[in-house]
Image (cartoon, helix red, strand yellow):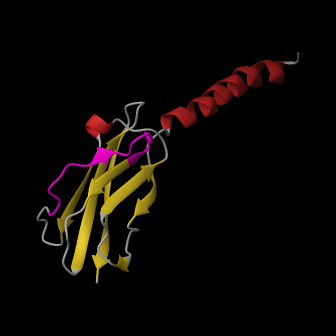
């Protein structure tokens, strides 16, 4: 081995190890399918469901629904969908026409927490 190869080999090895660790550092349960869809307009949904990119911890994950003024409109707590560790469901009471905000929070089974919100409109 020449001198340049001896110097570059530890650097290359370190870079490979760092790149191999990146996927685990990015492991979060991101929303993949949201029903009703963000920014959609339509009829009153009977429920709100969010399917995440990986399994979530139901005890530490939730969906809440508020009107535009921030008043809670859902009377029940969200629940995991049976036999689907990636999906949360919230039963929705009869809604009047208007814009509503879905607030979600989750903790993935690996412990990472995410939260977000989106709007939809009922005609």
| Majority secondary structure of magenta residues | loop
Task: Tell me where residue 16 appears, x and y as whole percent.
Answer: 68, 29
Q: Quadrant of residue 108?
A: top left
Residues in magenta? 73-87
Is residue 89 or residue 25 the one in the foreground?
89
| Quadrant assignment for the N terminus | top right
Is residue 7 or residue 38 the one in the foreground?
38
Question: Eyeballing the image, is 36 above or below 50?
Answer: below
Q: Quadrant of residue 8?
A: top right
Residue drawn 24% across the image and 71% down it: 100
In the image, is residue 3 part of the stretch drawn in magenta?
no
The outermost residue toward the bottom is: 123
Residue drawn 29% across the image and 45% down it: 79
Instruction: Count the labels in the image.
Output: 0
Question: Eyeballing the image, is 101 above or below 26?
Answer: below
In the image, is residue 78 part of the stretch drawn in magenta?
yes
Question: Eyeballing the image, is 54 above or below 66?
Answer: above
Task: Tell me where residue 81 appears, x and y as whole percent.
Answer: 38, 46
Residue drawn 24% across the image and 62% down it: 92
Residue drawn 37% across the image and 31% down it: 111
Question: In the rendered view, does 47 fall on the left or right side of 50?
Answer: left
Is residue 25 or residue 97 the one in the foreground?
97
Task: Tell me where residue 15 appears, x and y as whole percent.
Answer: 65, 30
| Quadrant assignment for the C terminus | bottom left
Task: Tell me where residue 31 appears, x and y as whole percent.
Answer: 43, 53
The outermost residue toward the right is: 1
């Amino acid at each position: 081995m020449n001198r340049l190869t001896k110097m570059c080999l530890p650097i290359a090895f370190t870079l490979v190890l760092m790149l191999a660790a990146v996927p685990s550092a990015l492991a979060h349960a991101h929303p993949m399918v949201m029903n009703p869809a963000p920014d959609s307009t339509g009829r009153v949904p009977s429920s709100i469901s969010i399917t995440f990119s990986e399994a979530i911890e139901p005890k530490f994950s939730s969906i809440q629904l508020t009107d535009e003024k921030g008043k809670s409109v859902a009377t029940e707590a969200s629940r995991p969908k049976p036999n689907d560790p990636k999906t949360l469901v919230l039963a929705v009471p009869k809604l009047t026409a208007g814009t509503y905000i879905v607030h979600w929070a989750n903790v993935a089974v690996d412990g990472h927490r995410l939260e977000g919100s989106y709007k939809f409109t009922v005609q």
